[in-house]
Amino acid sequence: MHNLDAAGHVRGESQYLDDIPVQRGTLHAAVYGSPLAHGKLLSLNLEAARRAPGVVRILTAQDIPGENQIGGIVPDEELLAGSHVHFQGMPVALVLAETEPQARAAVKLITADIEPLPIITDPREAQAKGELIVPPRTFRLGDPAAAWAECAHIIEGTAENGGQEHLYIETQGAYAYPTDGGGVRVHSSTQGPTAVQRHTARVLGTGMHKVEIDVTRLGGGFGGKEDQATTWGALAALGAFVTKKPVKLVLGRHDDLRMTGKRHPYTSDFKLGLSADLKLLAYEVTFYQNAGAAADLSPAVLERTLFHACNTYFIPNVRATAYSCRTHLPPNTAFRGFGGPQGMFVIESAIAKAADELGVLAWEIQRRNLLQDGQVFPYGQRVEDCNAELSWQAADQKFELKKWQAEVDAFNQQSPVRKRGLAVMPICFGISFTKTAMNQARALVHIYTDGSVGVSTGAVEMGQGVNTKMIQVAARTLGISPKRVRLETTNTTRVANTSPSAASATADLNGKAVEMACRELRTRLLRHAAEDLKMNYEGLEIQDEQVLAAGKPAETNWEKLVSTAYWKRVNLSENAHYATPDLWFDQTQEKGHPFAYHVYGTALVQATVDAMRGTYDVDAVRLVHDFGQSFTPGIDRGQIEGGLVQGLGWMTMEELIYNQDGRLLSNALSTYKVPDLYSVPKVLDVEFLETPGHPNAILRAKAVGEPPLMYGLGAYFAIRNAVRAFRPDVRPEFSAPFTPEKVLLNLYAARESAAAPAASQASGAEASVRN
Amino acid sequence: MSGTSTPKSAGQSLPPPPAAPVTLRINGQDHHLELAPWTSLLDALREYAGLTGTKKGCDHGQCGACTVLVDGKRINSCLTLAVLQEGADITTIEGLGQEGNLHPLQQAFIDHDAFQCGYCTPGQICSAQGLINEGKAHTEDEIRELMSGNICRCGAYVGILNAVKEVVDKKSIALRS
């Protein structure tokens, strides 16, 4: 079945935030952001802006009626800067004008007197100065300190990964109206309606019941609108609350890029111990996360880095420590994978380095250490229903790994300038919010008297196809056509206290709630049918809108059933609550059972490097993925392809650059390149690994949002292998993204310094070329 | 020491030139609009003609979300002024196909799951129609190259390529016969 939103999308009729018809009297807002990354805000000069054409009002921190605070996990983030600014682009003032161009023009007339304070952009420097968002966390398994003695090989090194701009094509925005009784209604482009509601209420000094958040759909989110949509929702609401007029705030692309946080850059140190037969025996890793200027979701992202520090490998002795470091960049935030990819990049780098030093292929180490049932993750959860070996073997068989490797080697033998590299990227990703309490959801289902059905959940449609999945679940459970079912907007007055659409868990959590509500309604309707038609309740079912008794058509169909039930005063609405069973985590011990289940898969990635130019193509990605029992294979395949492409982009071309003043230099699509149609691998095979799925997954179809992003890591190591095919003496540092520039620097690294492992990132290679 | 940002012309902005009547022919229909001279075609379509199918992604001609057809040629509507397109034939996503009678590209995008969030889709489809009108792209490689100005951050490129290829192939078969 295709995505049910398709017809609207292809005709341009799907309504996004900026498409909502504007009410008469609407004011348009623009934000004045701090020109400096850190300083004391001495004064603001608003006079010229106030006199500018069309300007109605300018709001600053003083105009906030409630608390000037939008920090979710840690209360450390002001909505509008009060006494200090903490990053370039931090909102300082909100201009309200009659038109959007007037508001934006007036912003340019604002000046601020700011006393500069020292700026930190490097997480290691922040850690050394004690600038931590939360205390460090350490996950432990076994005794690595004792295990080193048993290791035949010990490998040490450093790995760095850059950030990643979400670049949802629909920028951030919100449209707020004052409502009857002193409240406010906000149309928000958010993945987390409840977060916007909670913080808006806090800012306005009112109850959450007076703040209604409504979300139609998002033009992309990827994590960037999980927590960071709150600022714009709360600002629009503040404007509407203060002026009693509708206020619309849509960020221009430039503002969106410089004011919002990204995927976290990390710098990490690793130490990996192996036995003589290439078994991983011990792993110590220290992560330094660049959190930016406020906590945002960084502590939760940090936690997921620790959960995925060993990827899909069993290592009996582990110590993984992570620091969330406060710098003066925009607060970094959720991005598909949520810290997991950063953790996995380090263990894969460690394995690649071990392969370099031991003169073996990395996949020879990888395949010897895959997780197996009965083992234990460093966080205490037992490995169950493990498909690590299964997906590896399936990929090996279908894509003939050894033969492929031989072909790559043969190609490299006869090709002097173009070199190929092959890498295997197996993944294991845990499904659930790691904060156990968030694994709950509700659904409200109404059956109308004509037999049509309205479903409300906390799920936000952002392209992942969750609307189609919810409609499928409702239609299947009720035994009716999906055409009868409508998925309503996500609205905090219909479904309250929602978890954000995140953690790949949205379809599972909300789908289970829809299933429960529909089951209850079905039971109620069939009990009514049994009574009404004097039939035995046992054996009654609804299939294709027909009521069946012991498999044979009964005297009623769906429409009649609903209509007669109404007249018998049967309740045709149901609200269901679902909480994922058996989850727990004890943070004092860093042990528990945080995940409902795990998703596995294995990708084979080939890249070809042009050793004259440093350019490359990721030619082929062939993967086997553990979908469980997919009931929307078209949508799920799309998630794999899209996640992979984002992962490839992060590892290859997407280079986020801030200067030492904390100013974003890659501040447009001309300076920050994302994958286009040309950069997608020409060969892209997605094979469905048939597995039973998991009872905690909706209709046993496993979560599919985040895991495929990590297949993209394979591109980094494939390119690296190709570089080494040209220059076997070079051991490129682990510094993602592997841009063509870095490739070139490695291809022509000076001979004498090339073999020496350097600790810092690309600058090391750069220096060796200059010498 | 204080760090201060100074605007270029604080408090001295000139009064804007008045809006003037502009007639745009969009999807075969004349729209009489009052537009300031610097209004982009994109803003004219969305904010004045009420046609919100064309999307604003970057407003800098870098993402392709706002692609429309002007006299059959694809153009980033954010990079052209509305007044420059007076007298031209403008086609937006709303002008391609009707409900129940979709344009072949619209149907192909559905058949190949060529989108996820849908935000770039109108631009992708208009761009693909422009590509077909140009008659240059026949192979997959040519389509990749000539559609590379339309960014899909969801990464639905496999579907987009297949959808466009299918319609391009049908077109060339029709032309040969």
Image: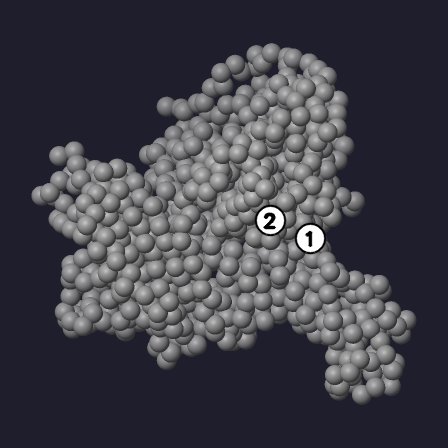
Residue A311 horizontal side relative to residue B91, left or right: left
Inspect the image, locate mark 2, and give the three-letter code of the amino acid beneath it: Ala
The numbered disc on residue A80 is none
Q: Nearer the viewer, residue A654 or A595?
A: A654
Residue at the image point whose x is 62% and y is 66% from the top: A511
Residue A704 horizontal side relative to residue A353, left or right: right
Callouts 1 and 2 close, C-beta under 8 Å: no
Instruction: State the image quarter where residue A424 is shown.
Output: bottom left
Instruction: Label 1, secondary structure: give it.
Output: loop
Residue A519 horizontal side relative to residue A535, left or right: left
Q: Nearer the viewer, residue A605 or A742?
A: A605
Residue at the image point whose x is 13% and y is 49% from the top: A729
Residue at the image point whose x is 41% and y is 24% from the top: B3
Residue A367 horizontal side relative to residue A360, left or right: right
Residue at the image point whose x is 38% and y is 70% from the top: A394
* Pointer 2 residue: B108
Q: Residue furthest left?
A: A752
Image: A286 above or below A202: below
Chain of the residue that carries numbered disc 1 in the rendered image: A
Give residue A150's position: percent from left, percent from top: 16, 73
Q: Counting other residues with Cα less than 10 Å from the Cα at mark 1, is it few (<14), some (14-19), or many (20 or more)?
A: many
Inspect the image, locate mark 1, and give the three-letter code of the amino acid beneath it: Thr
Whether residue A419 is visible here, answered yes or no, is yes
Chain of the residue that carries numbered disc 2 in the rendered image: B
The numbered disc on residue A489 is 1
Instruction: Label 2, secondary structure: give it.
Output: helix
